[in-house]
Amino acid sequence: MLRLLKTNLIAALLLTLFMGIQSAQAAKSKILVVTNDEDSSYYDLYLELDEFDNAHGLSMYDHADKEWVQFQVKDLSKGVDLKKEGSHKVIVLKSDDFEHDRGGHFLVDYLNNGLTGKRSDLEITIDFDGHSWKVFHRGAEIEQLNFKVKKFLGKTVGIDRVEIQ
């Protein structure tokens, strides 16, 4: 009887410890799908959340390479490179006012023309509504950014435009 009680107590303690570890682990919340029309590649952008749904990082999953790239929220003010080609920063995500518990305004800065160095940008907002994180463009909720490439003499030289869905 005493052995059974000890076994049940140990099992209960292990279960409690396991549940505590599970709740302390960060969760991911998918906020955006990013596509590229040139090679049909796509990426999922996630917020890294703590147990209170506060954002402490970003991560992007590349479906073609099956790889994760992680970014820190503190680096958003200087910009995080979502996509690089050689020395060219193709897509950069920036925010000067992102708050861990409510979101902020973002600039999606992209290389419009690699030959001239011309860049363009798109403004989005990432907000927490008390239940989930969502992305908006001009007040409308969005789920996907489709980058349409610009070609010159058959070679990709930049991003022509971004279509929003």
Image: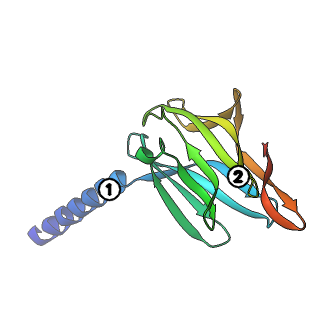
Residue 75 is marked as: none
Between 147 and 40, the residue placed more toward the observer is 147
Determine crowd level at label 1: few under 14, some 14-19, many 20+ residues with C-alpha closer than 10 A: few
Q: Do we see residue 7 in this rendering? A: yes
* Residues marked 1 and 2 touching at CB (< 8 Å): no
Please report whichever mark, 1 or 2, sits nearer to the chain's N-terminal start: 1
Residue farthest toward the front in the current orientation of the protein: 116
Query: Where residue 1 sits: x, y (%)?
Result: 12, 69
Q: Is residue 82 above or below residue 105?
A: below
Q: Does 113 sit left or right of 63 as displayed?
A: right
Q: Residue furthest left?
A: 2
Report the colour scheme. rainbow
Disc 1 versus disc 2: distance between alpha carbons? Answer: 51 Å
Tell me residue 54's x, y (percent): 42, 40
- Taking the image as drawn, is residue 56 in sight? no
Instruction: Judge depth for marks 1 and 2 and give the one in front.
Output: 2
Amino acid type shown at disc 2:
Gly
* Residue picked out by circle 2: 117
- In the foreground, 91 or 127: 91
Q: Position of residue 156 (x, y in %)?
A: 81, 64
Q: Amino acid at mark 1?
A: Met
Label 1, secondary structure: give it.
Answer: helix
Residue shown at 68% from the left, 71% from the top:
64
Mark 1, residue position: 19
Which SS class for mark 2? loop
Please report the residue visible at 57 percent of the width from the left and 58 percent of the height from the top.
60
Q: Nearer the viewer, residue 148 or 164?
A: 148
Q: Determine the residue positioned at 18% across, 69% down.
A: 7
Q: Quadrant of residue 12?
A: bottom left
Quadrant in the picture for the C terminus: top right
How far across and how far down the image is residue 38, in percent? 82, 64
